Image (cartoon, rainbow, N blue to C red):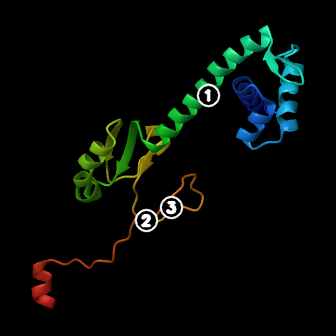
Amino acid sequence: MDVVLSMSLFRRVAETGSFSAAANETRLSQPTVSKHVSALEKRLGVKLISRSTRQLTLTDAGKQYYERCIHILDELTETEANLKQQQSCPAGLLRVNIPIVYGRLEILPRLWPFLERYPDLSIELIMEDRNIDLIKEGVDMAIRVGRLDDDSPFVAQKIGESPRVTVASRRYLSNRG
């Protein structure tokens, strides 16, 4: 059985003083809650709850286990919340490799507002027109122009496209039209 679920159910039984109340709160059947608590007792080799037809009470071992369950379950909940928050709020160092012109035109004008929005994030821009070895250089992401090789180990996401542009000098255009 899931030990964390069993601990949670034991905690609710201890706090409500009833298997039925804990079952109603968790939308499980009363026998399911009882099986989880019994599985905990079997796993631990101690009786956690003294049951009678009219009431239940925690044994000394049950009181001790209840106190630890509170600590462990609350710590687990806090840890999960912190991890979820970290996923929604980027933090740390992000090393990005981008072509020079693209960086000047597209990234730099947007960089300060982005960093203000995510103050726990630091960005190291590596602006070069050559494709560097991302793994060797310890780069987290790169912006590239063109297609990714079929055998590339990297994941690519198209972020835009540029129309084909014909470029000529004024002299050429004045001579040729």
Q: Is residue 61 left or right of residue 126?
A: right
N-term-proximal mark, 1 vs 2: 1
N-term-proximal mark, 1 vs 3: 1
Residue 146 is marked as 2
State whether residue 89 is above or below residue 68: below
State whether residue 127 is above or below residue 40: below
State whether residue 51 is above or below residue 106: above
Q: Amino acid at mark 3?
A: Leu
Give percent across and percent down for residue 144.
40, 58
Question: Circle 3 sits in a helix, a strand or a loop, which is it?
Answer: loop
Q: Which residue is mark 1?
A: 76
Q: Crowding near pointer 3: few (<14 within 10 Å), some, many (20+)?
A: few
| Separation of residues labelled 1 and 3 (CA atoms) | 41 Å
Q: Amino acid at mark 2?
A: Gly
| Residue shown at the point (38%, 70%) measured from the top left | 161
Q: Is residue 4 left or right of residue 100?
A: right
Q: Which residue is mark 3?
A: 148
Figure quadrant of residue 149: bottom right
Q: Nearer the viewer, residue 6 or 33?
A: 33
| Separation of residues labelled 3 and 2 (CA atoms) | 7 Å
Question: Circle 1 sits in a helix, a strand or a loop, which is it?
Answer: helix
* Contact flag, marks 1 and 3 (Cβ < 8 Å): no
Q: Nearer the viewer, residue 152 or 10?
A: 10
Give percent across and percent down for residue 87.
49, 42
| Separation of residues labelled 1 and 2 (CA atoms) | 45 Å
Quadrant (top left/top right/bottom left/bottom right) for the C terminus: bottom left
Q: In front: mark 1 or mark 3?
A: 1
Q: Nearer the viewer, residue 135 or 104?
A: 104
Give percent across and percent down for residue 158.
45, 64
